[in-house]
């Protein structure tokens, strides 16, 4: 994707380790509370069974995925959460990240506490993702309008992130107009 001589021009943003550790511990505690919630469930009959099934499913899917994702990010600190280059954006900032998004596919970017990247042709531009990640991204776009990730876990401020997006896009525009 990115030639090695251009790698030094990329803007790389990493996770804040302290916040990731707190998130990892929180996710672990919710997963660990699952057996306790089942044992202490006072509901009986079908209501109790439904409560337990919903609790176990939600905890294991949501918090279990969060625990694995944050633990993986903590164990591999050399991997950036977000890479912005003249070729596009590489998103690893969420559990079901979108991966590489070329600038030509980007319709708009909104930067705030949450970054929202609106993609022109979703099916074409996310086809490289595994089915589960593609489904989550498609659902995210349908509900919220774009590929999204939080900036609170990144070790940067919003201004620096906006500047990196602008610089990457301008470099891509200049390179594509020269071609």
Image (tube, helix red, strand yellow):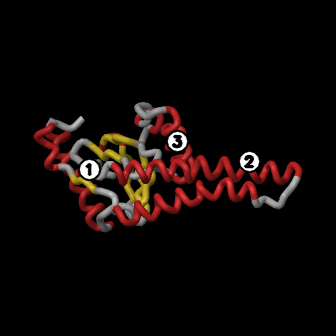
Please give the name of the residue rendered at 16% of the width and 42% of the height, measured from the top-left corner: 175
Judge by depth and name the residue closer to the eye, 96 or 32: 32
Disc number for residue 78: 1
Q: CA distance from mark 1 to mark 3?
A: 29 Å
Query: In the figure, is residue 144 to the left or right of 6?
Result: right
Image location (x, y in percent) of residue 18: 37, 66
Image location (x, y in percent) of residue 64: 55, 49
Image location (x, y in percent) of residue 33: 63, 58
Q: CA distance from mark 1 to mark 2?
A: 38 Å
Disc number for residue 53: 2
> Quarter-wise, where is residue 160 in the image?
bottom left
Query: In the figure, is residue 122 to the left or right of 54?
Result: left
Q: CA distance from mark 3 to mark 2?
A: 26 Å
Disc number for residue 54: none
**Position of 71 relative to 22 (above/below):** above
Please give the name of the residue rendered at 88% of the width and 51% of the height, measured from the top-left corner: 45
Q: State which tag comes first along the sequence, 3 or 2.
A: 2
Disc number for residue 138: 3
Q: Residue furthest right?
A: 45
Q: Are marks 3 and 2 in contact (CB under 8 Å)?
A: no
Q: Nearer the viewer, mark 1 or mark 3?
A: 1
Judge by depth and name the residue closer to the eye, 41 or 125: 41
């Amino acid at each position: 994707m990115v030639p090695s001589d251009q790698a030094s021009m990329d803007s790389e943003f990493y996770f804040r380790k302290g916040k990731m550790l707190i998130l990892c511990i929180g996710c672990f505690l919710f997963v660990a509370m699952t057996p306790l919630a089942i044992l202490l469930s006072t509901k009986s009959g079908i209501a109790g069974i439904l409560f337990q099934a919903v609790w176990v499913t939600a905890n294991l899917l949501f918090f279990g995925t969060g625990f694995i994702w944050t633990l993986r990010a903590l164990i591999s600190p050399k991997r950036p959460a977000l890479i912005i280059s003249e070729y596009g954006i590489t998103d690893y900032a969420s559990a079901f990240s979108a991966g590489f998004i070329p600038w030509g596919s980007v319709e708009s970017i909104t930067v705030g506490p949450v970054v929202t990247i609106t993609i022109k042709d979703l099916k074409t531009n996310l086809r490289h993702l595994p089915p589960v990640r593609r489904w989550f991204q498609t659902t995210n776009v349908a509900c919220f309008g774009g590929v999204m990730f939080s900036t609170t876990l990144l070790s940067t401020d919003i201004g620096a992130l906006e500047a990196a997006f602008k610089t990457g896009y301008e470099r891509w525009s200049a390179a594509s107009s020269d071609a």
